[in-house]
Image (cartoon, rainbow, N blue to C red):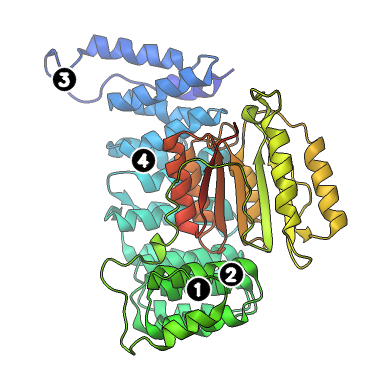
Amino acid sequence: MPGSVLGPLVGALVLLAGPGPAPATPQEPSRVELRRRIDELETELRAPKPETRRGAVRALAELRRREAWLLVLGALQDRDSLVGDAAQRALGTLDDPHIVAELLGRSGLESREPRVALRAAEALGRLPLEVDGELIARRLDGGDAELSRLLLWSLDRLIEGGRLGGRRQRIAEAVLELHRSRKAPELAARALVTLAALEHPDLASLAHEAAYERQVALRCAALVIARVGQEPSLLGLPAALAGDAEPRVRALAIDALAARPSRAALLTLVERLEQEPRLGLRQRLVASLQAATGLKHRLDARPWRHVVERLPADWRPSPGAPGQDEQHSSGSLAKGPLRIPVDSDRIAFLFDFSGSMWAPLPDGRTPKELVAVRLREALATLTGEARFNLVPYAYDPLPWRDALVDAEPAQVREALDFFERCNAHGKGNVYDAARLALADPQVDRIVVLTDGVPTGGVFSDLELVVELLGEHALLRGVAFDAVLVDAPGTRARLWRALAQRTGGRVTEVGLE
């Protein structure tokens, strides 16, 4: 039953702690009225409709009372993502230190239910009050990479917001141990990023070591630090790694060079454009050069070299010029006809097979039939050196292949046949589909065709999904493109945020 998971908490509820409230005023409900309202909302938390339970969670958070917050914590266990997401995001307004202790304990981070622990780990970074980072650091575990990564991200956000409590040295020791363990290379790399946020005294030497590690993720972490950090000795790393054998490293080197544009940095970008074999990275190089100079030259490196070689030695972008983080602003234009962009030769196409894909159009066709035509056109542009995969998704991702495959004619025909036969229905679980695509180390671009509104999966609140995917893409150098079909404006804004963060773009289209 939807409310059965709340049982252990319901019995523990108590009346308002401490001395009784001041006499009721027209602006503040009496104790009796407040108790009645909480009881009503507790009943709604057991309603069969997830929308009702989600509304109850939001209303409870607005009450800002201890009993109400305990019920919000209990809603982290709800099996419907609408409800769990609402509880997770509501904790961003939590201002009761006693409830924070509950979130760090068995009701949250120490829960035996994995999804509750994950939700709690992410929510800790949202809290608006100071949190003891030592309690978070104690939970870091190289054997639990998913949870530990979210905890590291929460530490980063608490540091950025000036809300990290506890002894910094103890926190840094725990993070350094995770970095040194190498038990999970991706996690060790992510720990290095958090050491940068903690301003670890040995950061420069740790980053230099990582820059020449065999593990790709560690080299990527060194570049992320070089991009956003202030350590002068790390500024040469992007140029040194710009020709790395691993495309993921080259992608992040491009971003780091573009983040600090100078004549020397632009010359390095031009040199890479002259040599880079991968289409997706050539597109990234061009976008970086366009952002720095305001010019619109394309993939031909010759005009770029002509421009950059004539820049003065002390050249810097003029004030107000767009930077790397703004180059893919993905501003929406008027809705155009449906097309599927192909700006890479290592690309995963994700298709939202939720209800909107099957709603008949005025001419009797379904959106899926129109998408099939455009997919055929898109795949026809892939060269023989390209690799691709299709990942339709409904309740679960339904990948055509386990990893990217060569864009040979026979493979393309099989992919199109697979798409036309796919008859999946259900809620749109874009989070798990994107995570599946990110797990393929070859992928450097993910194109998502959707109506913009996730409805299923462990996480389905789009703002939360976008934040999580941005975090998971941090060390991957993967660009997210979104083709939004008749998407609401608020949803388009969130997709644009993900595209801008990762170097992708958003295209808004209509089907009529």
Q: Residue at x 31, y 36 (%)?
A: 94
Q: Residues within 10 Å of mark 3 (few under 14, many from 20)?
A: few
**Quick check: 503 left or right of 127?**
right
The picture places residue 63, in percent across and down from the top left corner, at 28, 23
The residues tagged by marks 2 and 4 sit, at their Cα atoms, a distance apart of: 46 Å
Work out how far the residue at label 3 is from the one at label 1, CA to CA, in angstroms. Answer: 59 Å
Q: CA distance from mark 1 to mark 2?
A: 8 Å
Which circle, 1 or 4, is nearer the viewer? 1
- Identity of the amino acid at label 2? Leu
Q: Are marks 3 and 1 in contact (CB under 8 Å)?
A: no
Of the pair 295 and 207, the residue shown nearer to us: 295
What secondary structure is marked by label 3?
Answer: loop
Q: What is the C-alpha distance between the residues marked 3 and 2?
A: 62 Å
Q: Position of residue 166 (x, y in %)?
A: 31, 57
Decide: is 415 above or below 421: below
> Which disc number belongs to residue 21?
3
Q: Residue drawn 71% across and 46% down? A: 375
User: Which quarter of the picture shows residue 387?
Assistant: bottom right
Q: Which quadrant of the structure image shows residue 478?
A: bottom right
Q: Which dot, 3 or 1, sits closer to the camera? A: 1
The secondary structure type at the circle numbered 1 is: helix
Give above or below for 79 relative to 89.
above
- Residue bearing the label numbered 4: 101
Disc 1 to disc 4, C-alpha distance: 43 Å
Identify the residue under disc 1. 254
Judge by depth and name the residue closer to the eye, 363 or 130: 363
Q: Which residue is mark 2?
A: 281
Count the marks: 4
Question: Which amino acid type is marked by label 1?
Answer: Ile
